[in-house]
């Protein structure tokens, strides 16, 4: 209410502000006390538990002798029926003496072996063994006659540009420029290169499966094979730029689509113009 010029503004006394301050301070005190209690309980309960825990000890890597023995057991149970107890081969499969670890890695890691049925060409299928078991099998076969082995290090660190040039020169005639595969003679075919791990790509060049030529280090050096491996990995994993891949067959499908779509559009436009006139 207005009280004239003689009135002075009403001021809030300190006695009225004190209860508000006390409420705020008591709230802060309760919060700090709660945090202190929780921290103390955590230190008392959780800290001893974490102090007792120890990192799990890593299992020691298997020695070469252990790998060979494990590979021998796997071979006798899964491969000897066709390839013989002594790896000398038989009516069901060829000799494995001297084929090397690379041949085993390619055939088993791609799922081509064990062979499911007597077919003209072993197809890619579900892998039956783990990578550790495959390495053990490869070590066992390698210990019987030697042969090509996979080099140490990253197989995908080759020169991409060099790999493209080498692939177009040595591989594209069968596998297609995009790695989509193609038909060969006598009922065989060059398989599609996707999916394939770097080890499978590299060991395929080393072992020369089916109708594929074998590329030793005299034909293609280690660095050149690594370059091809990187290029194949790139073209099979790269995203298609600009829309549909059209099977990645290149100008063949692109020209067919352009021809069919273009002619169809021209025919429809001709019919539409004729109907209007």
Image: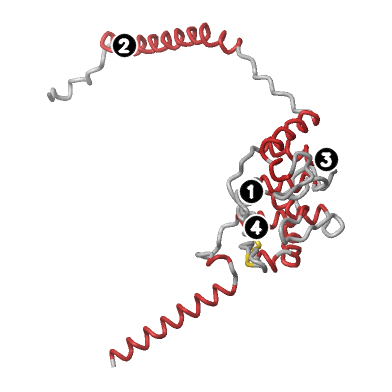
CB-based contact (under 8 Å), mark 3 and mark 2: no
**Cα distance in 3D space between marks 1 and 4:** 10 Å
> Where is residue 63, by image quadrant?
top right
Considering only order in the chain, which callout, 4 or 3, is on the residue closer to the N terminus?
4
Say what secondary structure mark 1 lies in. Answer: loop
Residue 206, position as x, y percentages in the image:
78, 53
**Cα distance in 3D space between marks 3 and 2:** 86 Å
Say what secondary structure mark 2 lies in. Answer: helix
Toward the viewer: 246 or 61? 61
Considering only order in the chain, which callout, 1 or 2, is on the residue closer to the N terminus?
2
* Residue at mark 1: 115
Classify 95 as above or below 137: below
* Residue at mark 4: 121
Name the side, left or right, on which 138 lies relative to 18: right
Question: Residue reaching furthest right?
Answer: 218
Q: Residue at x 72, y 50 (%)?
A: 91
Residue 230, position as x, y percentages in the image:
71, 54
**Cα distance in 3D space between marks 4 and 2:** 85 Å
Residue 114, position as x, y percentages in the image:
65, 45
Which label lies toward us, 3 or 2? 3
* Residue at mark 3: 144
Name the side, left or right, on which 53 lies relative to 277: right
Toward the viewer: 44 or 95? 95
Q: What label sits on residue 23 in the rendered view? A: 2
Q: Residues within 10 Å of mark 3 (few under 14, many from 20)?
A: some
Is residue 159 among the parts visible in the rendering? no
Which label lies toward us, 2 or 1? 1
The N terminus - image quarter? top left
Is residue 181 among the parts visible in the rendering? yes
């Amino acid at each position: 209410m207005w009280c004239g010029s003689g009135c002075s503004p009403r001021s809030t006394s300190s006695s009225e502000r004190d209860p508000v301050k006390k409420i705020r301070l008591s709230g802060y005190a309760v919060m700090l006390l709660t945090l202190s209690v929780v921290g103390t309980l955590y230190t008392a309960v959780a800290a001893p538990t974490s102090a007792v825990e120890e990192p799990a000890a890593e299992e020691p890597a298997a020695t070469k002798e252990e790998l060979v023995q494990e590979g021998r057991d796997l071979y006798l149970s899964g491969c000897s029926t066709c390839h013989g107890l002594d790896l000398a081969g038989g009516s069901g499969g060829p000799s494995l003496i001297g084929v090397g670890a690379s041949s085993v890695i390619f055939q088993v890691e791609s799922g081509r072996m064990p062979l499911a049925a007597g077919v003209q060409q072993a197809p890619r299928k579900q892998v039956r063994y783990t990578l550790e078991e495959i390495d053990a099998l490869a070590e066992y076969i390698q210990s019987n006659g030697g042969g090509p082995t996979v080099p140490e290090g990253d197989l995908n660190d080759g020169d991409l540009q060099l790999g493209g040039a080498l692939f177009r020169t040595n591989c594209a005639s069968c596998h297609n420029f995009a790695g989509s595969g193609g038909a060969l003679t006598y009922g065989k075919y060059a398989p599609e290169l996707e999916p394939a791990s770097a080890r499978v790509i590299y060991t395929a060049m080393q072992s020369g499966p089916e109708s594929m030529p074998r590329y030793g280090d005299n034909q293609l050096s280690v660095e050149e094979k690594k370059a091809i491996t990187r290029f194949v990995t790139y073209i099979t994993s790269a995203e298609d730029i600009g829309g549909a891949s059209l099977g990645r067959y290149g100008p063949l499908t692109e020209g067919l689509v352009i021809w069919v779509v273009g002619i169809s559009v021209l025919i429809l436009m001709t019919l539409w113009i004729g109907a209007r006139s």
